[in-house]
Amino acid sequence: MAGEAAVQTESETDEDIIDEAIALLRKMYPAKVVPVPTETIITRWGKDPFSRGSYSYMGQQATAEDHDLMAKPVGDHLYFAGEATCKSHPATVHGAYISGLRAAAEVVDSILGPIQPPCKPLIPPKPKLEMSYSGTTSRKRKAEESAIEKARELKTQRLEAHEKAMNDALVAALGERPSKPGRSGANPFLLYQKDHWYICKTKCDEARRKATNNPEAKATRNDVRAALGQMWRDAPETEKRPYLAETERNKESNAAGLVDFKKKIKDWDITAAKFKKEWKEKNASIPSEEEKQATRQAELEVCLSPDVVTRESKYILTGTQKKEIKRSRKMNGYAEDSEDEGY
């Protein structure tokens, strides 16, 4: 988040930020269940007294080597880390993390000296199984893999179609899940800025032309922002009062809208859960004959030994073989077909 979004977000409560993030995730993945997180960490970078929202950026004359210069230690006791010292990923969280690892390694080297890796690897290579397969065995393995893949594909198609049908019915009955309402401006300076931007820009352009003696010169956006900030600070209370009052009204409206939204979301979720339960009871997902046959074929090819007795298409299995079939079902996602049809 940057600009007005960052300023506005820092003024919100943790609960509001979490609700907004969850709402966006649920909108992105409507077919999935997005639960409330068990833990959250929310930072307010602009209010941090040691940063005040700042981060590094490249100036016009800067080069990538400047990041390396900032990362160089001073003597043997002062080392530097931070995103500004990471040439590969400046101005990022992962750049800060990488720089911390680098600085820590430099500290260790200064105390212990360079660490030589052991001659032998810490993790030995995985031993290769010396196995040879005949042409018949290889064909059998391919047939088993093909049968398992076909059974898995048929089941996936059935479950996806079942899920889609349920969600379509849910939307048709209840409508889309309520979206979080937009927020009106809750920062008086931002409201003031919208009204005075072009007035301030005109003044800044004039000052820029006088300073450079160039009739075509124009002030930069940063110049205008800085001037607007000063204008707001110097403005009398009578001029600020309407914006402060509008901000309070917007905050009250936002709070009321949020309460109404939370109630709608809660009611919708409860109704949706009840609808899904009843819909699944009335519309069970039943495997087709093709899927059942593919599942049985996959289990037999994987689990049955060559000496299984065949008698009128009925397979007589030992206790060990039955356990293997149940294990195969769990491993390959066929646990729901618990009946032993055809055995």
Image (cartoon, rainbow, N blue to C red):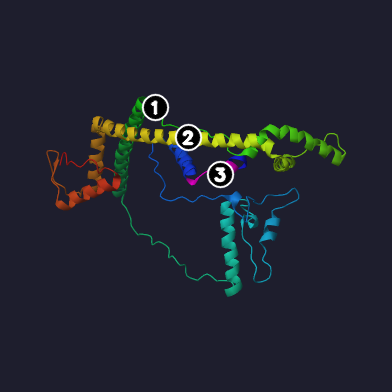
Name the front one of labels 2 and 1.
2
Q: Are marks 3 and 1 in contact (CB under 8 Å)?
A: no
Residue under the image location 56 percent in, 57 percent down:
97
Image quarter in which the N terminus is found: top right
Q: Amino acid at mark 2?
A: Ala
Range shown magenta: 7-14
Badge 2 or badge 3: first in the primary sequence = 3
Circle 3: residue type: Ser
Mark 1: which amino acid?
Gly
Q: Residues within 10 Å of mark 3 (few under 14, many from 20)?
A: few
Of helix, strand and loop, which one carries label 2? helix
Residue 8 location in percent, x, y?
Answer: 57, 41
x%, y% of residue 285?
Answer: 26, 33
Name the residue located 49 percent from the left edge and 43 percent from the top edge.
17
Write down the residue under mark 2: 256
In the picture, measured across the screen, residue 314 lies left or right of residue 24, that is left
- Mark 2, Cα crowd under 10 Å, few <14 / some 14-19 / many 20+, is few
Q: Quadrant of residue 197?
A: top right
Q: Residue furthest right?
A: 213
